[in-house]
Image (cartoon, helix red, strand yellow):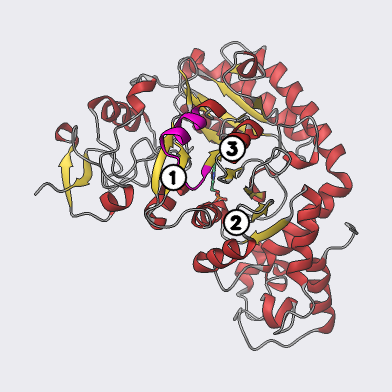
Amino acid sequence: MDHSRVPVLEALQEFRRRGDTVFGPPGHRQGRGVDPRVAEIVGLDVFRSDVLSLNGLDDRRQSQGVISKAQELMADAVGAEHAFFSTCGSSLSVKTAMLSVAGPGEKMLLSRNAHKSVIAAVVVNGVEPIWVHPKFDAERHIAHPPEPDDVRRRLEEHPDAKGMLLITPTDWGTCADIRGVARVCHEYDVPLIVDEAWGAHLPFHPALPAWGMDAEADLVVTSVHKMGGAVEQSSVFHLQYDRVSPEALKQREDLLGTTSASSLVFATLDGWRRQMVQHGHDLLEAAVRRAHRIRATAGELPGLRPMGQEVVDEGLAAEFDPLKLVIDVRELGISGMQAAEWLRTHRHVDVGGSDTCRISASITHADDDGTEKILLDSLRALVESADTIERQPPVHLPEASALELEQAMLPRDAFFAEVDHVPAERAAGRIAAEMISPYPPGVPVIAPGEVITDEVLDYLRSGVEHGVLIPDAADQSVKTLRVVARH
Ligand SMILES: Cc1ncc(COP(=O)(O)O)c(C=O)c1O
């Protein structure tokens, strides 16, 4: 296919050349009505490119096939049979992907280290989750994706499950053996969905971890805005084989998606695909070299322990994304959250993620010598200033087994049940009616339907005292919990 073509960008250019006068949304009329004080900050071009797809980029009948041609080019670029653009982020795409595999009351295998959007999908879609527990790394206190044998065991126990959802790469850059898991799923003739929200760059360089479509997954969801170059909320579904029908995927997407998709999302997805096909290899090669260099230099700084290939060598993960710089800061005597806050306040550097033990920074094709220097200089400054950062009470990190809570009710039934609000001291033994997800990374520690334990409460409460944020809890201080009422 001709990857120099960019159907959405070309249609946008043509729309502007024609100078159409629009009487439909958006009401700002491509910027004519925008308050100049807004334009001064975000730029008028944002509004000039904000055009509806119907009677805008394309005509009422979509006879130019603008979006479908762009999707075909995307599919071709990444080795998928079909690609569909979504403008609602992977949070929504994950729900759609799950809906196209299992309906209400049907079983689905889900990796328990899932992002909160997966647990939300379980509640919204009404599927019965069959959790596959991730591999817990006690030393680093993180979860790595489950292995093919873990999936096989659960499929043996639940041969009526309709499919499996795997999350890889994790927020911390460790990756699953996608091919191994896909083959197990296919032995049972069920599809594998991969939440590859962090993996939009993977198809474009062979030194990067396996890309789901190459590794025999059936349906892969990406967030191109995370590691790629499209604007926020740009998500793509990639589909192959015949275990998930494109028709079902499209219709279920239609259940949840917006009717006013953003052309900014479409246009930047289109441009990203062209850029990656034409220059992706060189850009990512440079980014990988840069990330290796930064990791090596950061590793020489006292108190910083960047995670690297050793997680693979230790057999904890199948692969590792070198572009994720995950640095354990515990030896500095501070938490990752404190390090992240210090870097923002004192160096104006915003790292992508942090938790009790570490910070994470993603290196992308957009980084250059300047950003490399800023990151390394600010890490040096952090190390030098660590002694001045106020010590805080430690977070009580639980044993891995304590994080595997008993599921006493279906998440959907618990979420919509009659509820009580109980003080944390009296919450152990009660069934959660809410999700409780420290953010980032937004992986629920407690999901609706799970039985709350003292160990998990101690972890969450000590975390909050230390500055962990739990935006989805009804009481973000976790002094009270929303639990299923007893009758
Ligand atoms: C593994 C995973 N899946 C899905 C999502 C949701 O993606 P988005 O922010 O594009 O909605 C995230 C977001 O952080 C994520 O980490």
Snapshot quadrant of residue 49: bottom right
Q: Is residue 142 magenta?
A: no
Label 1 within 8 A of ligand 1 by Cβ:
no
Q: Amino acid at mark 1?
A: Asp
Helix, strand or loop status at disc 3: helix
Q: Position of residue 211 (x, y in %)?
A: 71, 39
Q: Position of residue 26 (x, y in %)?
A: 61, 78
- Per the model, the C-alpha gap separating discs 2 and 1 is 34 Å
Instruction: Please state the extent of the stretch shown in magenta in the rendering.
Output: 150-164
Residue occupied by mark 2: 233
Q: Amino acid at mark 2?
A: Gln
Observer-nearest residue: 29 or 82? 82
The structure residue drawn at horizontal position 82% and vertical position 47%, both measured from the top left corner, is 276
Give above or below for 72 relative to 28. above
Observer-nearest residue: 69 or 181? 181
Helix, strand or loop status at disc 2: loop
Q: Is residue 154 magenta?
A: yes
At label 3, counting other C-alpha atoms closer than 10 Å, the crowd grade (few under 14, some 14-19, many 20 or more) is few
Give above or below for 219 relative to 309. below
Give above or below for 393 relative to 275. above
Q: Position of residue 472 (x, y in %)?
A: 36, 47
Do the CB atoms of the residues marked 2 and 1 lie less than 8 Å apart?
Answer: no
Mark 3 or mark 2, which is nearer the start of the sequence?
3
Label 3 within 8 A of ligand 1 by Cβ:
no
Helix, strand or loop status at disc 1: loop
The structure residue drawn at horizontal position 89% and vertical position 58%, both measured from the top left corner, is 1
At label 1, counting other C-alpha atoms closer than 10 Å, the crowd grade (few under 14, some 14-19, many 20 or more) is few
